[in-house]
């Protein structure tokens, strides 16, 4: 095992170079593409969620498909007979990077960064599923690399393109419920609480288990990991928080212009070193603006919902302001108390309708136009989500130094903010 990133050197170097935000412009190493030409796209991970993302970019030239599991990817491979086929994205990028303009990364969390970083180092635009990476350090590296190389990026928080989120953001920014001092976000998702299998199973035909493990420590194959249950395990996923945190915390990040928390604390079941956990509650403190955001999963919710007459939706974002409350999920929202806001004048729509989450990125790759979930926005969001797991696993309240990617006076956080990589998979 080896580690290639020195975190402090990385953040110091980026500060000196003035890297921080993606700006319009094209990297000189990227192939020029006019607005009327089609991009040459490689898709890394094309079964399951990857198949949906492949469909989202199917208007372009799909020049390469890469997947370690022939069973899951067979349908996608068949639909694009002209695309070059690979199992190992490292070989794909080594061999045909000159034929590729952009990549879509839809692998499990632990291989997001190794795939995306290799592609972006070669000047390829990048669409990557949420959360952006497996560790906070990986997310920061991806964010800064995208900015340095002036690449068009988008994180796969597809609901961000919906109209409902736009209307909620407009209500918050118009001050309809006053100054917001707290936000509560909950989702019923539950992963973890598993025991590592003691038996071994034969590797199914068509699955390259070693490539699936990628940068993770070697362990025997078991159906408890692949293809469905990898989010149950810290080596591969980030639990329920990693699955839905970026989708639902996206709304308060957007509405309140949140970036990095100043402190994070969490509680839940006893920590298991191998398996993720159900039933977390995580409290994030932000200094700018002065607010708190609390996340609940595994069936946990704020204990005041019933007594304050707040609907107990299965998943929701609740803004609490000085003049009222606003609850929202993917497709609906409601001002509370209803009697107070029955005749409220809603702000005129100011946020334009999205042309489509994937299409935003495609157009940005060709023209340098902005995307709504580029890594300069979705990077801090993903870092915040992942910090919740760090706080839970350390059992400590973390005071967060975002500039230096450090949990102040908490050495237990160090190996969770960054990680070791299997030889050949370093980033």
Image: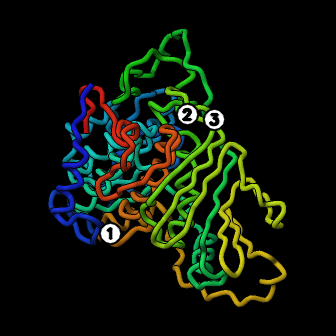
How is the rendered protein coloured?
A: rainbow
Give me the disc on residue 269.
3
Residue at 44 percent across and 36 percent down: it is 77
Quadrant the N terminus occupies = top left
Tag 2, which secondary structure? loop
The correct choice, above or below, for 416 with respect to 98 in the image is: above
Q: How many marks?
A: 3
Q: Position of residue 186 (x, y in %)?
A: 66, 54
Residue denoted by label 2: 276
Q: Is residue 333 left or right of residue 197?
A: right
Would you say the residues marked 1 and 2 are in contact, meaning their CB atoms lie under 8 Å apart? no
Q: Residues within 10 Å of mark 3 (few under 14, many from 20)?
A: few
On residue 36, the disc is: 1
Residue 118 in sight here: yes
Residue 65 appears in the figure? no
Q: Considering depth in this image, is 287 or 64 the residue closer to the camera?
A: 287
Viewer-nearest of discs 3 and 2: 3
Please, what secondary structure does the residue beneath circle 3 have?
Answer: loop
User: In the shown orientation, is residue 327 left or right of residue 224?
Assistant: right
């Amino acid at each position: 095992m080896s580690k290639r990133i020195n975190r402090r050197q990385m953040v110091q170097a980026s500060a000196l170079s003035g890297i921080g935000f993606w700006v319009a412009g094209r990297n000189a190493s990227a192939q020029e593409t006019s607005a009327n030409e089609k991009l040459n796209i490689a898709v890394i991970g094309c079964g399951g969620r990857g198949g949906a993302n492949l469909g989202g970019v199917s208007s372009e030239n799909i020049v390469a498909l890469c997947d370690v599991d022939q069973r899951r990817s067979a349908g996608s491979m068949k639909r694009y007979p002209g695309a070059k086929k690979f199992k190992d994205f490292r070989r794909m990028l080594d061999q045909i990077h000159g034929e590729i303009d952009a990549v879509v990364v839809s692998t499990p969390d632990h291989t997001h960064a190794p795939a995306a970083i290799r592609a972006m180092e070669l000047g390829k635009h990048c669409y990557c599923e949420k959360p952006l990476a497996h560790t906070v350090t990986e997310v920061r590296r991806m964010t800064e690399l995208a900015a340095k190389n002036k690449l068009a990026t988008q994180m796969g928080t597809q609901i961000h393109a919906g109209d409902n989120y736009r209307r909620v953001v407009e209500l918050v920014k118009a001050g309809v419920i006053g100054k917001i001092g707290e936000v509560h976000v909950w989702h019923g998702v539950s992963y973890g609480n598993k025991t590592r299998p003691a038996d071994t199973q034969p590797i199914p035909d068509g699955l390259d288990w070693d490539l699936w493990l990628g940068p993770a420590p070697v362990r025997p194959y078991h159906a408890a990991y692949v293809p469905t249950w990898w989010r149950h395990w810290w080596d591969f996923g980030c639990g329920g928080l990693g699955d839905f945190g970026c989708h639902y915390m996206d709304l308060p990040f957007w509405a309140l212009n949140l970036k990095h928390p100043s402190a994070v604390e969490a509680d839940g079941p006893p920590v298991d070193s191998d398996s993720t956990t159900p039933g977390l509650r995580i409290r994030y403190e932000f200094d700018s603006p002065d607010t708190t955001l609390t996340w609940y999963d595994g069936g946990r919710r704020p204990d005041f919902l019933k007594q304050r007459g707040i609907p107990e939706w299965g998943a929701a974002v609740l803004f609490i302001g000085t003049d009222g409350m606003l609850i929202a999920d993917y497709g609906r929202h409601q001002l509370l108390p209803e009697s107070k806001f029955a005749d409220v004048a809603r702000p005129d729509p100011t946020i334009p309708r999205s042309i489509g989450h994937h299409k935003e990125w495609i157009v940005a790759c060709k023209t340098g136009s902005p995307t709504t979930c580029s890594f300069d926005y979705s990077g801090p969001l993903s870092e915040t989500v992942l910090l919740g797991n760090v706080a839970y696993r350390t059992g400590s309240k973390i005071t967060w130094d975002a500039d230096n990617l450090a949990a102040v006076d908490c050495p237990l956080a160090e190996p969770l903010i960054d990680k070791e990589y299997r030889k050949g998979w370093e980033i």
